[in-house]
Amino acid sequence: MNEQTIVFVDLETTGGSTTADRITEVGIVEMGPDGVSEWSSLVNPQMSIPPFIERLTGISNGMVQDAPTFAEIAPELIQRLSGKLFVAHNARFDYGFLKNEFKRLNLPFRADVLCTVKLSRRLFPQEYKHNLDAIISRHALVAESRHRALADARVLWLFMNKLEHEQPAALREAMDELIRQPALPPYLDRDVVDDLPEGCGVYLLYGENDLPIYIGKSTNLRKRVLQHFAADMRNGKEMQIAQQVRRIDWIETAGELGALLLEMRLIKERQPTLNHRLRRTSELCSWQLEEMPDGFLRPRLVYARDLDFGRMENLYGLFHSQREAVNTLRKIAEFNQLCLIRLGLETANRSGGKPCFAYQLRRCRGACIGREEAGMHNIRLLTALSKHRMATWPYGGPIGIREQDALAIRSELHVVDHWCYLGTVHAEHELPGLLDNAGQPAFDIDTYKLLSKHLKQAASDSIVEL
């Protein structure tokens, strides 16, 4: 560690959003061949510090009123950080804030980054907690004042020094692995990859002519995107992505539900070439029961192009083709000894009275020749189809599903109606515009499956009837 210059960095901010919030304090402990030095400064964030942040950090609006702005300390700060190993706790947070602040001033900044959370997890996998308080307690470190930038930066320096003395070989091995730069395709800008957040969201990979080649979602965008480029290149899709990708974009979401809904919508709208499952187009159809003149219920195949499946009742199964629907009904009939003629899967002879083919194989109880009454056959048919019945929309109209990130910083309301995703809003005043312009979206089988599963498990206070 003494052979390189390391800066232990901690920031205090007005909140957790790297784009919406601002820095209120910077603390740096620098360690290198020439020894150890410290530097810190309060920063005027040019916005109000929320009361709960004031209570957490002890930094008030009055304290930063006469402090320099970030633009004023930026030249000295970038000189102190450039070319040195950047060490922080939850490093993507501190590094992301600084990159955004420098970007506002059109100042390029990049550094090798080491996260002490990841380092602690790597060296002490048996431990459950790896937050700074846990590390202070576990390693008996001296902490002067928690949630002040320089004091927390000192804790990181003490932690690394203790590791250097107690397990130097393990520390160097872990540092080498955590700092190692991921291999990237030749056309990708490393600065863009460096900006990838570690939160939840959707990522979009573009090829030549800025056409989307792949869209995916993850609870950790940075980790998932880099996995594409670190994957076994014998995987055909990953090889195609690595060869074709020219640009990366992403949209952060509050949680996994928002990411899944957005991923499905974007794939169907933009039709990326390497997404095969979710971009599929098909003749979505379902069975609907109708009563025949002789009292028997007969399944009739209906199509989503003709009916609004989100508002229809008495639908059984969702199928991507007529062939899939017919094959499924045949299997149900065979397993439950239902009559193929009564189900419309076999044509009766003109004279009537001749049993269906299944009856001859003892797979039908004789509804085709009057040996089973309509009422009994109908009951058995309804029972057999019950587990395939499409769920009816359980609300009177559209609803919003609330979702927050783990830190309660990002909050979203996903608006859905009759199993159709209408969109997401981040503030209440956006809701009327979304509802007015939503129109009637097409029913989508993947969205239906996702929402029907989610609503069964969702907490009641997360649902808002609109």
Image: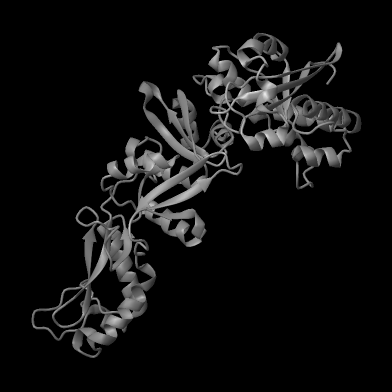
Pick whichever, 311 or 355, lies toward us: 311
Pick whichever, 71 or 155, lies toward us: 71
Q: Position of residue 272 (x, y in %)?
A: 37, 35
Q: Position of residue 95 (x, y in %)?
A: 64, 24
- Work out whether 152 lies above or below 422: above
Quarter holding the N terminus?
top right
- Work out whether 379 lies above or below 276: below
Going 36% across and 21% down the picture, which residue do you hit? 209
Pick whichever, 411 or 197, lies toward us: 411
Q: Position of residue 90 (x, y in %)?
A: 69, 33
Give the image quarter of residue 316. bottom left
Going 78% across and 24% down the picture, which residue do you hit? 150
Give the image quarter of residue 57. top right
Q: Position of residue 145 (x, y in %)?
A: 81, 32
Q: How is the image coloured?
A: one colour
Q: Is residue 366 visible?
A: no
Give the image quarter of residue 27. top right
